[in-house]
Amino acid sequence: MTAAAETVTEEPPRCPWAGSDAAMQAYHDTEWGFPVADDRRLFEKLCLESFQSGLSWRTILHKRDNFRAAFADFDISKVAAFDDDAVERLLANAGIIRNRAKIEAAINNARQAQELISREGSLAGFLWTYEPSMAELGAPQELTTVPSAAALATVLKKQGWKFLGPTAVFAFMQSMGLVNDHTYDCHIRQRVAKALAHFARP
């Protein structure tokens, strides 16, 4: 065996949840925690968090392209227009999570998002007002929710959104950059901190 063959590339330190799955590692390194102000991407993640309920993020991530194709790339106006025939079509799609309640919740939530945008101007502008304060946060990945996430979940529920409890909302905040919850030794933590420092809140 040559010296080159014996060389093992050492993986950089990551949050433990990234594991050894290549898709999970790529998601961790390029998406999770980086701040997002795009309404479509925020809506997509809210939908995927609701589909994840009771499942692992790895399962959802590996089906994400299928979800995007099935839900018109999570275009809010297009999803809001889905009818009963669309629900049946989605229930027949083996590439996504075929749960009627979750599918109907995604359509309902698109309609709620439309109403929210008409009132607030943008989904991003509304959601970022719930950015948690440092006083709410413990050590990275120590908490499963925080008061700001619980407050947002309560408001969304009152407005008619479904399948978005405090834990799902906090997971959304972690992934969309409202919280930098990368572990202290993670090689991405400082990149996210820098991105947040230069991020213009919507």
Image (cartoon, helix red, strand yellow):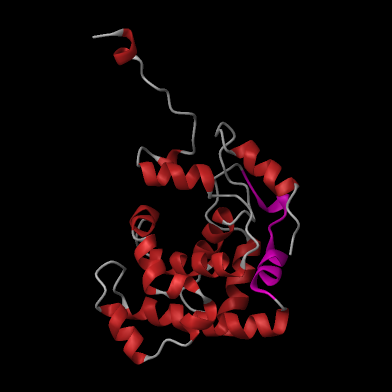
- Along the line of sight, which residue is nearer the eye, 55 or 37? 37
Query: What residue sits 29% from the left and 73% below the top?
Result: 98
Quadrant, the C terminus: bottom right
Q: Position of residue 132 (x, y in %)?
A: 68, 57
140 versus 92 height, above or below: above
Q: Magenta residues, as a range? A: 122-138
Viewed as shown, does residue 22 lie left or right of 37? left
User: Could one spot residue 17 in this view of the protein?
Assistant: no
Chief secondary structure of the magenta span? helix
Quadrant housing residue 1:
top left
Q: Position of residue 135 (x, y in %)?
A: 72, 50
Q: Is residue 175 magenta?
A: no
- Along the line of sight, which residue is nearer the eye, 191 or 154? 191
Quadrant housing residue 115:
bottom right
Q: Position of residue 190 (x, y in %)?
A: 65, 37
- Along the line of sight, which residue is nearer the eye, 43 or 135? 43
93 versus 191 height, above or below: below
